[in-house]
Amino acid sequence: MLKIAEKVVERARVHGAQQAAASAYQVREVSVQWRDGAVEKLTEATTRGVGVELYVDGRYASVSTSDLRADALDTFLADAVAMTRALAPDPFRALPDPALYAGQAAVDLELADPRYADLTAVERRELAEQLEAAARDTPDAARILSVTTSVSDSQSHSWRVHSDGFAGEKSGTSYWLGAEVSVQDPDGRRPEDACYAGARWRGDVPEPQGIGAEAARRTLSRLGSQKPASGQLTLVVDARAAGRVVSSLLGGLSAAGWQQKRSFLEGKLGAQIGNDLLDISDDPLVVRGLGSRRFDGEGIASRPLPLFADGVMKNGFIDTYYGKKLEMPPTTGRLSNLRWRLGSRTRAELLADVGDGILVTGFLGGNANGTTGDFSWGIQGFAIRGGRVAEPIGEANISGNHLTLWPTLLAVGDDPYRYSALRTPTLVFGGVHVAGR
Protein backbone atom coordinates (compact mmCIF):
# COMPACT_ATOMS: atom_id res chain seq x y z
CA MET A 1 0.00 0.00 0.00
CA LEU A 2 2.96 2.34 0.54
CA LYS A 3 3.96 1.75 -3.08
CA ILE A 4 0.42 2.60 -4.16
CA ALA A 5 0.50 5.89 -2.22
CA GLU A 6 3.87 6.77 -3.75
CA LYS A 7 2.63 5.93 -7.24
CA VAL A 8 -0.53 8.00 -6.79
CA VAL A 9 1.49 11.08 -5.86
CA GLU A 10 3.84 10.51 -8.80
CA ARG A 11 1.01 10.12 -11.32
CA ALA A 12 -0.89 13.12 -9.91
CA ARG A 13 2.18 15.24 -10.61
CA VAL A 14 2.45 13.80 -14.12
CA HIS A 15 -1.19 14.75 -14.80
CA GLY A 16 -0.54 18.36 -13.78
CA ALA A 17 -0.87 18.73 -10.00
CA GLN A 18 1.78 21.02 -8.54
CA GLN A 19 1.40 19.33 -5.14
CA ALA A 20 -0.29 16.13 -4.01
CA ALA A 21 -0.76 14.03 -0.89
CA ALA A 22 -2.01 10.44 -0.80
CA SER A 23 -3.27 8.35 2.12
CA ALA A 24 -3.59 4.63 1.44
CA TYR A 25 -5.31 2.49 4.05
CA GLN A 26 -6.46 -1.01 4.89
CA VAL A 27 -8.90 -1.65 7.75
CA ARG A 28 -10.39 -4.87 9.12
CA GLU A 29 -13.42 -4.62 11.42
CA VAL A 30 -15.24 -7.49 13.16
CA SER A 31 -18.24 -7.25 15.47
CA VAL A 32 -20.64 -9.60 17.24
CA GLN A 33 -23.94 -8.38 18.66
CA TRP A 34 -25.68 -10.74 21.06
CA ARG A 35 -29.19 -10.30 22.43
CA ASP A 36 -31.00 -12.37 25.04
CA GLY A 37 -29.23 -15.66 24.47
CA ALA A 38 -28.61 -15.58 20.74
CA VAL A 39 -26.46 -13.95 18.11
CA GLU A 40 -28.34 -10.98 16.68
CA LYS A 41 -25.80 -9.65 14.22
CA LEU A 42 -22.37 -10.61 12.88
CA THR A 43 -20.25 -8.38 10.67
CA GLU A 44 -16.77 -8.67 9.24
CA ALA A 45 -15.35 -6.31 6.65
CA THR A 46 -11.97 -5.45 5.21
CA THR A 47 -11.73 -2.22 3.24
CA ARG A 48 -8.89 -0.77 1.21
CA GLY A 49 -8.65 2.54 -0.52
CA VAL A 50 -6.70 5.68 -1.17
CA GLY A 51 -7.55 9.33 -0.55
CA VAL A 52 -5.83 12.01 -2.59
CA GLU A 53 -5.43 15.74 -2.00
CA LEU A 54 -4.71 17.68 -5.20
CA TYR A 55 -3.30 21.20 -5.53
CA VAL A 56 -3.69 22.28 -9.14
CA ASP A 57 -3.12 25.82 -10.46
CA GLY A 58 -4.14 27.39 -7.13
CA ARG A 59 -7.16 25.12 -6.80
CA TYR A 60 -7.78 22.24 -4.40
CA ALA A 61 -9.76 18.99 -4.35
CA SER A 62 -9.92 15.95 -2.11
CA VAL A 63 -10.99 12.70 -3.79
CA SER A 64 -10.88 8.98 -2.99
CA THR A 65 -11.26 5.59 -4.61
CA SER A 66 -11.26 1.93 -3.66
CA ASP A 67 -10.28 0.73 -7.14
CA LEU A 68 -6.54 0.25 -6.74
CA ARG A 69 -5.73 -1.28 -10.13
CA ALA A 70 -2.90 0.65 -11.78
CA ASP A 71 -4.81 1.57 -14.96
CA ALA A 72 -7.94 2.52 -13.00
CA LEU A 73 -5.92 4.73 -10.65
CA ASP A 74 -4.26 6.52 -13.54
CA THR A 75 -7.60 7.28 -15.19
CA PHE A 76 -9.04 8.34 -11.83
CA LEU A 77 -6.17 10.77 -11.23
CA ALA A 78 -6.32 12.26 -14.74
CA ASP A 79 -10.05 12.90 -14.30
CA ALA A 80 -9.58 14.28 -10.77
CA VAL A 81 -6.90 16.75 -11.85
CA ALA A 82 -9.09 17.91 -14.75
CA MET A 83 -12.03 18.35 -12.35
CA THR A 84 -9.88 20.33 -9.92
CA ARG A 85 -8.99 22.81 -12.66
CA ALA A 86 -12.71 23.63 -12.96
CA LEU A 87 -12.97 24.72 -9.31
CA ALA A 88 -12.61 28.24 -7.95
CA PRO A 89 -9.09 29.26 -6.91
CA ASP A 90 -8.25 29.18 -3.21
CA PRO A 91 -4.92 30.86 -2.41
CA PHE A 92 -4.83 29.46 1.12
CA ARG A 93 -4.65 25.82 0.06
CA ALA A 94 -1.20 24.20 0.10
CA LEU A 95 0.69 21.39 1.80
CA PRO A 96 2.23 22.29 5.18
CA ASP A 97 5.68 23.82 5.41
CA PRO A 98 8.01 20.75 5.28
CA ALA A 99 9.76 22.06 8.41
CA LEU A 100 6.64 20.99 10.34
CA TYR A 101 7.26 17.34 9.44
CA ALA A 102 10.52 17.28 11.38
CA GLY A 103 10.89 16.18 14.97
CA GLN A 104 8.64 13.13 15.17
CA ALA A 105 8.99 11.58 18.61
CA ALA A 106 11.26 8.54 18.68
CA VAL A 107 8.92 6.54 20.88
CA ASP A 108 7.06 3.28 20.42
CA LEU A 109 3.44 4.21 21.12
CA GLU A 110 2.42 0.51 21.13
CA LEU A 111 -0.75 1.17 19.16
CA ALA A 112 -0.89 -2.29 17.54
CA ASP A 113 -1.35 -5.46 19.57
CA PRO A 114 1.01 -8.06 18.02
CA ARG A 115 -1.41 -10.84 19.00
CA TYR A 116 -4.42 -9.39 17.22
CA ALA A 117 -4.67 -12.38 14.85
CA ASP A 118 -4.99 -14.78 17.81
CA LEU A 119 -8.59 -13.73 18.54
CA THR A 120 -10.96 -16.29 16.99
CA ALA A 121 -14.62 -16.21 15.99
CA VAL A 122 -15.41 -18.74 18.74
CA GLU A 123 -13.77 -16.50 21.37
CA ARG A 124 -15.75 -13.48 20.21
CA ARG A 125 -19.01 -15.38 20.61
CA GLU A 126 -17.96 -16.69 24.03
CA LEU A 127 -17.13 -13.18 25.19
CA ALA A 128 -20.58 -11.98 24.10
CA GLU A 129 -22.23 -14.82 26.03
CA GLN A 130 -20.13 -14.13 29.13
CA LEU A 131 -21.14 -10.47 29.09
CA GLU A 132 -24.83 -11.42 29.18
CA ALA A 133 -24.34 -14.11 31.81
CA ALA A 134 -22.58 -11.63 34.07
CA ALA A 135 -25.33 -9.04 33.61
CA ARG A 136 -28.00 -11.57 34.57
CA ASP A 137 -26.06 -12.93 37.56
CA THR A 138 -27.80 -10.68 40.08
CA PRO A 139 -30.44 -11.27 42.76
CA ASP A 140 -32.63 -8.78 40.88
CA ALA A 141 -32.40 -10.69 37.59
CA ALA A 142 -36.22 -11.01 37.46
CA ARG A 143 -36.43 -7.27 36.83
CA ILE A 144 -34.25 -7.50 33.72
CA LEU A 145 -36.19 -7.30 30.47
CA SER A 146 -33.36 -7.58 27.98
CA VAL A 147 -29.58 -7.71 27.68
CA THR A 148 -27.70 -6.78 24.52
CA THR A 149 -23.95 -7.27 24.39
CA SER A 150 -21.32 -6.42 21.82
CA VAL A 151 -17.79 -7.54 21.03
CA SER A 152 -15.85 -5.65 18.39
CA ASP A 153 -12.27 -5.31 17.25
CA SER A 154 -10.36 -3.69 14.43
CA GLN A 155 -6.94 -3.63 12.83
CA SER A 156 -5.82 -0.73 10.66
CA HIS A 157 -2.79 0.22 8.58
CA SER A 158 -2.31 3.49 6.75
CA TRP A 159 0.45 5.13 4.75
CA ARG A 160 0.69 8.83 3.91
CA VAL A 161 2.94 10.34 1.20
CA HIS A 162 3.37 13.98 0.14
CA SER A 163 4.94 15.32 -3.00
CA ASP A 164 7.24 17.52 -0.90
CA GLY A 165 8.99 14.61 0.79
CA PHE A 166 6.83 13.50 3.71
CA ALA A 167 6.20 9.78 4.19
CA GLY A 168 4.66 8.18 7.27
CA GLU A 169 3.03 4.93 8.38
CA LYS A 170 0.53 4.14 11.13
CA SER A 171 -0.75 0.82 12.47
CA GLY A 172 -3.27 0.23 15.21
CA THR A 173 -5.65 -2.22 16.82
CA SER A 174 -8.63 -1.83 19.11
CA TYR A 175 -10.89 -4.09 21.17
CA TRP A 176 -14.25 -3.15 22.71
CA LEU A 177 -16.67 -5.01 24.95
CA GLY A 178 -20.06 -3.70 26.03
CA ALA A 179 -23.39 -4.59 27.56
CA GLU A 180 -26.72 -2.74 27.56
CA VAL A 181 -29.46 -3.69 30.02
CA SER A 182 -33.11 -2.70 30.25
CA VAL A 183 -35.27 -3.33 33.32
CA GLN A 184 -38.91 -3.02 34.38
CA ASP A 185 -39.75 -0.27 36.86
CA PRO A 186 -42.84 -0.92 39.02
CA ASP A 187 -44.52 2.17 37.53
CA GLY A 188 -44.13 0.86 33.97
CA ARG A 189 -41.01 2.75 32.92
CA ARG A 190 -38.16 0.84 31.36
CA PRO A 191 -34.82 2.30 32.44
CA GLU A 192 -31.76 1.44 30.37
CA ASP A 193 -28.06 1.83 30.98
CA ALA A 194 -24.82 0.29 29.77
CA CYS A 195 -21.13 -0.28 30.37
CA TYR A 196 -18.45 -0.27 27.66
CA ALA A 197 -14.69 -0.62 27.82
CA GLY A 198 -12.01 -0.77 25.17
CA ALA A 199 -8.27 -0.50 24.58
CA ARG A 200 -5.55 -0.78 21.98
CA TRP A 201 -4.36 -4.14 23.36
CA ARG A 202 -6.68 -6.97 24.28
CA GLY A 203 -4.92 -7.55 27.60
CA ASP A 204 -5.85 -4.00 28.69
CA VAL A 205 -9.60 -4.59 28.33
CA PRO A 206 -11.39 -5.58 31.58
CA GLU A 207 -12.84 -9.05 31.92
CA PRO A 208 -16.38 -9.44 30.50
CA GLN A 209 -17.71 -10.48 33.89
CA GLY A 210 -16.97 -7.06 35.36
CA ILE A 211 -18.39 -5.17 32.38
CA GLY A 212 -21.65 -7.17 32.32
CA ALA A 213 -22.12 -6.89 36.08
CA GLU A 214 -21.51 -3.12 35.98
CA ALA A 215 -24.07 -2.66 33.19
CA ALA A 216 -26.69 -4.46 35.28
CA ARG A 217 -25.76 -2.56 38.44
CA ARG A 218 -26.01 0.80 36.69
CA THR A 219 -29.39 -0.04 35.18
CA LEU A 220 -30.94 -1.51 38.32
CA SER A 221 -29.83 1.56 40.26
CA ARG A 222 -32.16 3.63 38.03
CA LEU A 223 -35.30 1.98 39.45
CA GLY A 224 -37.59 4.45 41.16
CA SER A 225 -35.93 7.49 39.62
CA GLN A 226 -37.62 10.82 40.37
CA LYS A 227 -37.26 14.44 39.29
CA PRO A 228 -35.03 16.48 41.62
CA ALA A 229 -36.05 19.83 43.02
CA SER A 230 -35.08 22.77 40.81
CA GLY A 231 -32.41 25.18 41.95
CA GLN A 232 -28.79 26.34 41.76
CA LEU A 233 -27.03 23.18 42.86
CA THR A 234 -23.55 21.74 43.21
CA LEU A 235 -23.00 19.26 40.38
CA VAL A 236 -20.58 16.32 40.56
CA VAL A 237 -20.11 14.98 37.03
CA ASP A 238 -18.92 11.37 36.96
CA ALA A 239 -15.66 10.76 35.07
CA ARG A 240 -17.40 8.60 32.46
CA ALA A 241 -20.07 11.23 31.81
CA ALA A 242 -17.83 14.32 31.93
CA GLY A 243 -16.73 13.87 28.33
CA ARG A 244 -20.03 15.38 27.18
CA VAL A 245 -19.26 18.68 28.94
CA VAL A 246 -15.58 18.74 28.00
CA SER A 247 -16.06 17.91 24.31
CA SER A 248 -18.50 20.81 24.07
CA LEU A 249 -15.86 23.13 25.55
CA LEU A 250 -13.16 21.85 23.20
CA GLY A 251 -15.41 22.40 20.20
CA GLY A 252 -14.76 26.10 20.75
CA LEU A 253 -11.04 25.58 20.02
CA SER A 254 -11.57 24.88 16.30
CA ALA A 255 -9.72 27.31 14.03
CA ALA A 256 -12.48 26.90 11.46
CA GLY A 257 -14.96 28.19 14.03
CA TRP A 258 -12.68 31.12 14.84
CA GLN A 259 -12.24 32.11 11.21
CA GLN A 260 -15.95 31.85 10.47
CA LYS A 261 -16.99 33.61 13.70
CA ARG A 262 -18.85 30.50 14.88
CA SER A 263 -16.99 29.87 18.12
CA PHE A 264 -17.61 31.22 21.61
CA LEU A 265 -13.83 31.07 22.14
CA GLU A 266 -12.96 33.13 19.05
CA GLY A 267 -10.59 35.96 19.96
CA LYS A 268 -9.99 34.62 23.48
CA LEU A 269 -6.41 33.33 23.24
CA GLY A 270 -4.73 34.44 26.44
CA ALA A 271 -8.05 35.10 28.17
CA GLN A 272 -9.21 33.59 31.46
CA ILE A 273 -11.88 31.00 30.56
CA GLY A 274 -12.02 29.11 33.85
CA ASN A 275 -10.42 29.20 37.25
CA ASP A 276 -6.97 27.75 37.94
CA LEU A 277 -8.33 24.18 38.20
CA LEU A 278 -8.95 24.14 34.44
CA ASP A 279 -5.59 22.82 33.23
CA ILE A 280 -5.64 20.59 30.14
CA SER A 281 -3.14 19.68 27.43
CA ASP A 282 -3.47 17.72 24.21
CA ASP A 283 -1.00 14.82 24.46
CA PRO A 284 -0.56 12.70 21.31
CA LEU A 285 2.30 10.63 22.77
CA VAL A 286 0.46 8.55 25.38
CA VAL A 287 1.61 4.93 25.08
CA ARG A 288 -1.36 2.79 23.94
CA GLY A 289 -3.53 5.91 23.97
CA LEU A 290 -6.77 5.75 22.01
CA GLY A 291 -5.91 9.00 20.19
CA SER A 292 -2.12 8.69 20.08
CA ARG A 293 -0.09 9.46 16.94
CA ARG A 294 3.43 10.47 15.92
CA PHE A 295 2.09 12.75 13.17
CA ASP A 296 -1.32 14.24 12.47
CA GLY A 297 -3.55 14.10 9.41
CA GLU A 298 -1.38 16.65 7.61
CA GLY A 299 1.92 15.00 8.47
CA ILE A 300 2.77 17.59 11.14
CA ALA A 301 4.97 16.05 13.83
CA SER A 302 2.98 15.45 17.01
CA ARG A 303 3.96 17.08 20.27
CA PRO A 304 2.09 18.01 23.47
CA LEU A 305 -0.01 21.17 23.17
CA PRO A 306 -1.22 23.18 26.19
CA LEU A 307 -4.91 24.09 25.77
CA PHE A 308 -5.80 25.66 29.12
CA ALA A 309 -3.27 26.48 31.85
CA ASP A 310 -4.56 27.75 35.19
CA GLY A 311 -7.81 28.56 33.37
CA VAL A 312 -6.14 30.63 30.65
CA MET A 313 -6.72 29.60 27.03
CA LYS A 314 -3.31 28.90 25.49
CA ASN A 315 -3.89 27.28 22.08
CA GLY A 316 -6.47 25.99 19.66
CA PHE A 317 -6.64 23.29 17.00
CA ILE A 318 -5.18 25.11 14.00
CA ASP A 319 -4.53 23.30 10.74
CA THR A 320 -2.49 24.69 7.85
CA TYR A 321 -5.48 26.01 5.88
CA TYR A 322 -7.18 27.96 8.63
CA GLY A 323 -3.83 28.96 10.09
CA LYS A 324 -3.10 30.82 6.85
CA LYS A 325 -6.52 32.45 6.85
CA LEU A 326 -6.07 33.57 10.44
CA GLU A 327 -2.38 34.41 9.99
CA MET A 328 -1.57 32.06 12.87
CA PRO A 329 1.01 29.25 12.99
CA PRO A 330 -0.49 25.77 12.72
CA THR A 331 -0.59 23.55 15.79
CA THR A 332 -2.62 20.51 14.80
CA GLY A 333 -6.05 20.17 13.26
CA ARG A 334 -7.70 17.89 15.81
CA LEU A 335 -7.60 16.43 19.29
CA SER A 336 -5.49 13.38 20.18
CA ASN A 337 -5.60 12.53 23.92
CA LEU A 338 -6.23 14.88 26.82
CA ARG A 339 -3.88 15.16 29.78
CA TRP A 340 -5.38 16.77 32.88
CA ARG A 341 -3.77 18.29 35.93
CA LEU A 342 -5.53 15.93 38.28
CA GLY A 343 -6.61 16.51 41.83
CA SER A 344 -5.65 14.29 44.76
CA ARG A 345 -9.11 13.22 45.93
CA THR A 346 -11.23 10.25 44.93
CA ARG A 347 -14.83 10.58 43.81
CA ALA A 348 -16.03 9.39 47.23
CA GLU A 349 -13.97 12.09 48.92
CA LEU A 350 -15.31 14.74 46.54
CA LEU A 351 -18.88 13.65 47.30
CA ALA A 352 -18.20 13.90 51.02
CA ASP A 353 -16.90 17.45 50.55
CA VAL A 354 -19.97 18.46 48.52
CA GLY A 355 -22.46 17.49 51.19
CA ASP A 356 -25.66 18.03 49.18
CA GLY A 357 -26.05 18.24 45.42
CA ILE A 358 -26.43 16.01 42.36
CA LEU A 359 -24.16 13.30 40.96
CA VAL A 360 -24.52 13.20 37.16
CA THR A 361 -23.85 9.75 35.70
CA GLY A 362 -25.25 10.34 32.21
CA PHE A 363 -26.63 12.89 29.77
CA LEU A 364 -29.84 12.38 27.82
CA GLY A 365 -30.29 14.57 24.77
CA GLY A 366 -30.02 18.32 24.79
CA ASN A 367 -27.84 20.63 22.76
CA ALA A 368 -24.99 23.10 22.90
CA ASN A 369 -24.53 26.21 20.79
CA GLY A 370 -20.94 26.38 19.57
CA THR A 371 -21.27 30.04 18.62
CA THR A 372 -22.54 31.39 21.94
CA GLY A 373 -21.39 28.69 24.39
CA ASP A 374 -24.94 28.16 25.67
CA PHE A 375 -25.89 24.58 26.60
CA SER A 376 -28.95 22.71 27.79
CA TRP A 377 -28.66 18.98 28.57
CA GLY A 378 -30.90 16.35 30.08
CA ILE A 379 -29.27 14.52 32.97
CA GLN A 380 -29.66 11.40 35.04
CA GLY A 381 -27.86 10.37 38.20
CA PHE A 382 -28.38 10.53 41.94
CA ALA A 383 -29.07 13.00 44.66
CA ILE A 384 -26.18 13.62 47.04
CA ARG A 385 -27.23 13.93 50.67
CA GLY A 386 -24.82 14.34 53.52
CA GLY A 387 -21.91 13.55 51.25
CA ARG A 388 -23.32 10.18 50.15
CA VAL A 389 -25.09 8.90 47.04
CA ALA A 390 -28.84 8.86 47.70
CA GLU A 391 -31.95 8.25 45.56
CA PRO A 392 -31.79 8.11 41.72
CA ILE A 393 -32.89 11.20 39.82
CA GLY A 394 -33.85 11.79 36.19
CA GLU A 395 -36.09 13.81 33.88
CA ALA A 396 -34.07 16.89 34.79
CA ASN A 397 -32.18 19.47 32.79
CA ILE A 398 -29.10 21.60 33.36
CA SER A 399 -28.45 24.81 31.45
CA GLY A 400 -25.89 27.58 31.31
CA ASN A 401 -22.97 28.90 29.30
CA HIS A 402 -19.39 27.61 29.15
CA LEU A 403 -17.98 31.05 29.83
CA THR A 404 -19.77 31.15 33.17
CA LEU A 405 -19.58 27.40 33.96
CA TRP A 406 -15.80 26.86 34.06
CA PRO A 407 -15.08 29.65 36.56
CA THR A 408 -17.31 27.65 38.96
CA LEU A 409 -15.14 24.50 38.75
CA LEU A 410 -14.72 23.51 42.40
CA ALA A 411 -12.66 20.33 42.13
CA VAL A 412 -11.00 17.88 39.74
CA GLY A 413 -10.81 14.21 40.71
CA ASP A 414 -7.90 11.80 40.59
CA ASP A 415 -9.72 9.31 38.33
CA PRO A 416 -9.30 9.92 34.56
CA TYR A 417 -11.68 7.73 32.56
CA ARG A 418 -9.55 5.12 30.81
CA TYR A 419 -11.85 4.24 27.93
CA SER A 420 -11.91 7.56 26.09
CA ALA A 421 -9.24 9.74 24.51
CA LEU A 422 -10.69 12.63 26.57
CA ARG A 423 -9.62 10.85 29.79
CA THR A 424 -11.93 13.05 31.85
CA PRO A 425 -11.80 12.86 35.65
CA THR A 426 -14.71 13.55 37.99
CA LEU A 427 -15.52 17.27 37.84
CA VAL A 428 -17.35 19.33 40.47
CA PHE A 429 -19.16 22.56 39.55
CA GLY A 430 -20.89 24.98 41.89
CA GLY A 431 -24.20 26.76 41.42
CA VAL A 432 -25.38 25.05 38.22
CA HIS A 433 -28.99 25.72 37.21
CA VAL A 434 -31.00 22.49 37.45
CA ALA A 435 -34.59 22.33 36.23
CA GLY A 436 -36.55 19.48 37.77
CA ARG A 437 -39.85 19.70 39.64
Image (cartoon, helix red, strand yellow):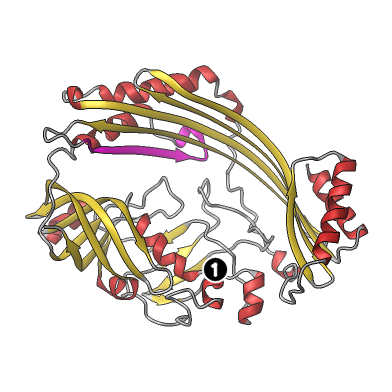
Q: Residues within 10 Å of mark 1 (few under 14, many from 20)?
A: many
- Horizontal arrangement in the rendering, residue 250 relative to residue 401 (left or right): right
Q: Nearer the viewer, residue 245 or 374?
A: 374
Q: Quadrant of residue 217?
A: top left
Q: Position of residue 420 (x, y in %)?
A: 43, 49
Vertical comparison of 22 with 372: above or below: above
Q: Quadrant of residue 101?
A: bottom right
* Residue that protrudes farthest toward the front in the picture: 86
Q: Position of residue 152 (x, y in %)?
A: 50, 32
In the image, residue 255 lies in the stretch drawn in magenta: no
Q: Residue at x 69, y 60 (%)?
A: 299
**Image quadrant in which the C terminus is located:** bottom left
Q: Residue at x 37, y 64 (%)?
A: 368
* Residue that protrudes farthest toward the right in the picture: 14
Q: Residue at x 40, y 47 (%)?
A: 418
Asked if residue 164 can be seen in this view, the reply is no
Q: Residue at x 38, y 61 (%)?
A: 246
Q: Position of residue 90 (x, y in %)?
A: 74, 74
**Image quadrant in which the N terminus is located:** top right
In the image, residue 198 lies in the stretch drawn in magenta: yes
Q: Which residue is mark 1?
A: 317
Vertical comparison of 3 with 285: above or below: above
Q: Nearer the viewer, residue 405 or 168?
A: 405
What amino acid type is highlighted by mark number 1?
Answer: Phe
- Secondary element under disc 1, as helix, strand or loop, is loop
> Magenta residues, as a range?
190-204
Q: Position of residue 139 (x, y in %)?
A: 16, 23
- Horizontal arrangement in the rendering, residue 255 relative to residue 270 (left or right): right
